[in-house]
Amino acid sequence: MQIELIVESMLLPRLPDGQRLELPDGATAADAVAAMEQQGLTGSRTAAEVLSSHMLLCNSRHCQGDAVLHDGDRLILMKTLLGG
């Protein structure tokens, strides 16, 4: 299956619009981030670091790393904002 990746973070490399990632059926959001790390798409950060410091959105809805992805899904990685 293929998903679309969008990265909204100054801590990760910018991806081209429409960046796609090939994953096996049944892959989770955490699997997608691990695949990004393997392909050098997380810069110097490990998948675990990305998962702990970024919010995940699948098709514009907040999700956790264990969310199962489907063909055509859009996964957004957004840096978590802190402060008041």
Image (cartoon, helix red, strand yellow):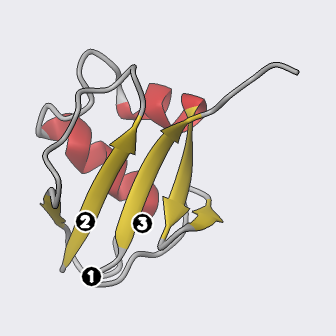
Identify residue for label 1.
Answer: 72
Where disc 3 sits, the SS reads: loop
Tell me if 49 is positioned left or right of 31 in this view. Answer: right
Location of residue 37 (image quadrant): top left
Instruction: Find the distance from the CA under tag 2 to the CA under tag 1.
Output: 7 Å
Q: Looking at the rendering, in which quadrant would you find the C terminus?
A: top right
User: Which of 13/34 is in front?
Assistant: 13
Q: Above or below — where is 69 with respect to 4? A: below
Counting from the top left corner in percent of width and height, residue 48 is at 46, 32
Mark found first going from the N terminus, 3 or 2: 2
Q: Residues within 10 Å of mark 3 (few under 14, many from 20)?
A: some
Counting from the top left corner in percent of width and height, residue 52 is at 58, 32
Counting from the top left corner in percent of width and height, residue 40 is at 14, 31
Identify residue for label 2.
Answer: 4
The residue shown at (53%, 60%) is 57
Which labelled disc corresponds to residue 42? none
Amino acid, disc 3: Thr
The residue shown at (23%, 27%) is 13
The answer to whether marks 2 and 1 mark residues whose Cβ atoms lie closer than 8 Å is: yes
Instruction: Find the distance from the CA under tag 3 to the CA under tag 2.
Output: 14 Å
The residue shown at (81%, 19%) is 83
Where disc 1 sits, the SS reads: loop
Tell me if 78 is positioned left or right of 10 in this view. Answer: right
Where disc 2 sits, the SS reads: strand
User: Which of 16/4 is in front?
Assistant: 16
Amino acid, disc 2: Glu
Identify residue for label 3.
Answer: 28
